[in-house]
Image: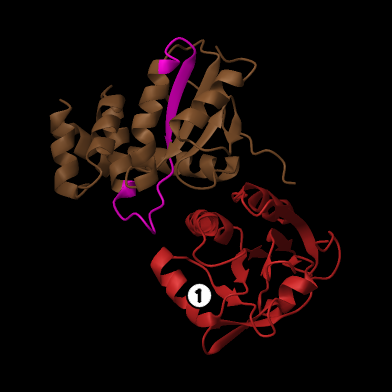
């Protein structure tokens, strides 16, 4: 039996976070904007955030599997660049809601759609900051034992169960720290 | 029972493509052997995608990744192309499962191998291994830590 996979880089102030900071349930999602399973998980995670509104905090980190998803890295960099303008979750939602078109032109359109400055985002990407961030996320994912996209860590431990709503909600409910 | 740490890793020569063989002894640096039950199964595909994506972290430490299953070389070739696997997939098919047996990870009941990882050091000895439940994708963290511990 393999040992339990543990989050290698603890949750910190740099992370993109939603929900109460003192939440009893901290869910870290490693995801890929082009991955169809992440797209399926997106509304499920949103529903969990509603169900566990008082007790769950969601963090998102990038795990682009570029070999199978050619637009995943560019999409992740756009999300990070827009995140620098304080609109990470807006672009995050937009990317998952428009997974079918993540072409370069579409990505720029989404940046404008969420009210971010396109020129500034483009410059940040050209300067390489978002890429560094995505690579750091990627390495932390691999070191944590992320085993596909999406991979969830609940309170620092990899969740190996199903991420369909019912089993995931049931798991969160029965955790000692759950609501 | 999977081979234990410290024992000499059994040599093998297996087809990596329909006409090209790969031997363990060809590699100077550490080798990570990734035994998986079968091409195309959902868990295996995810596991290999993660190792593919992580391959640059292994290459940076001079380590070579090798996937092994009992599927034939033609099957591997299509699977590798379709799933964009970034390292060789070896065909342990003739005789079936011979290498898996030598490493103690053959599954007699269904004729496949366990989901097992071995890190072989520069001296050709098993430095680390892990056998996971067949339905659980192990991720690449354990193998990466083991490779780093060698350098």
Q: How is the image coloured?
A: by chain
Q: Is residue B136 above or below residue B9?
A: above
Residue B87: x %, y % from top left? 52, 68
Query: Which residue position is annotated with label 1?
Result: B76
Chain bearing mark 1: B
Q: Colour of chain B?
A: red
Relative to the observer, which residue lies in front, B46 or A165? A165
Boundaries of the magenta span = A51-73
Left or right: where does residue A61 sit relative to residue B109?
left
Residue A63 against residue B23 in the figure, above or below: above
Tell me if A94 is positioned left or right of B38 in this view.
Answer: left
Q: Which chain is brown?
A: A
Q: Kindly tell me whether residue B6 is visible in this rendering.
A: yes
**Spot occupied by residue A45 in the image (x, y as percentages of width and height):** 40, 28
Q: Residue at x 64, y 52 (%)?
A: B144
| Residue B24 belongs to magenta span | no
């Amino acid at each position: 039996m393999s040992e339990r996979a543990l989050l290698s880089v603890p949750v910190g102030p740099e992370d993109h976070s939603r929900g109460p900071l003192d939440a009893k349930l901290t869910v870290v999602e490693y995801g890929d904007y082009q991955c169809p399973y992440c797209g399926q998980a997106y509304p499920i995670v949103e529903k969990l955030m509603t169900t566990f509104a008082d007790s769950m905090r969601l963090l998102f980190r990038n795990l682009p599997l570029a070999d199978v998803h050619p637009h995943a890295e560019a999409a992740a960099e756009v999300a990070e660049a827009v995140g620098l303008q304080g609109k990470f979750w807006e672009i995050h939602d937009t990317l998952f809601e428009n997974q079918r078109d993540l072409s370069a032109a579409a990505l720029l359109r989404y940046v404008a759609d969420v009210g971010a400055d396109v020129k500034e985002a483009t410059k940040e990407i050209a300067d390489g900051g978002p890429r560094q961030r995505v690579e750091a996320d990627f390495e932390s994912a691999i070191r944590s034992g992320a085993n596909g996209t999406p991979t969830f860590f609940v309170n620092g431990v990899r969740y190996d169960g199903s991420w369909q709503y019912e089993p995931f909600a049931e798991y969160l409910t029965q955790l000692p720290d759950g609501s | 029972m999977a081979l234990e740490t410290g024992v000499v890793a059994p040599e093998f020569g297996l087809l990596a493509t329909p006409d090209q063989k790969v031997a363990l002894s060809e590699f100077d640096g550490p080798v990570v052997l990734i035994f998986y039950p079968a091409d195309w199964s959902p868990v295996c595909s995810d596991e290999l995608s993660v190792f593919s994506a992580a391959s640059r972290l292994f290459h940076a430490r001079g380590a070579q990744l090798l996937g092994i299953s009992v599927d034939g070389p033609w099957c591997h070739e299509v699977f590798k192309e379709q799933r964009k696997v970034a390292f060789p997939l070896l065909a342990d098919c003739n005789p079936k499962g011979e290498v898996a047996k030598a490493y103690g990870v053959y599954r007699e009941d269904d004729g496949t191998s366990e989901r097992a990882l071995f890190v072989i050091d520069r001296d050709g000895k098993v430095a680390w291994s892990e056998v996971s439940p067949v339905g659980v994708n192990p991720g690449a963290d354990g193998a990466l830590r083991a490779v780093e511990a060698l350098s």
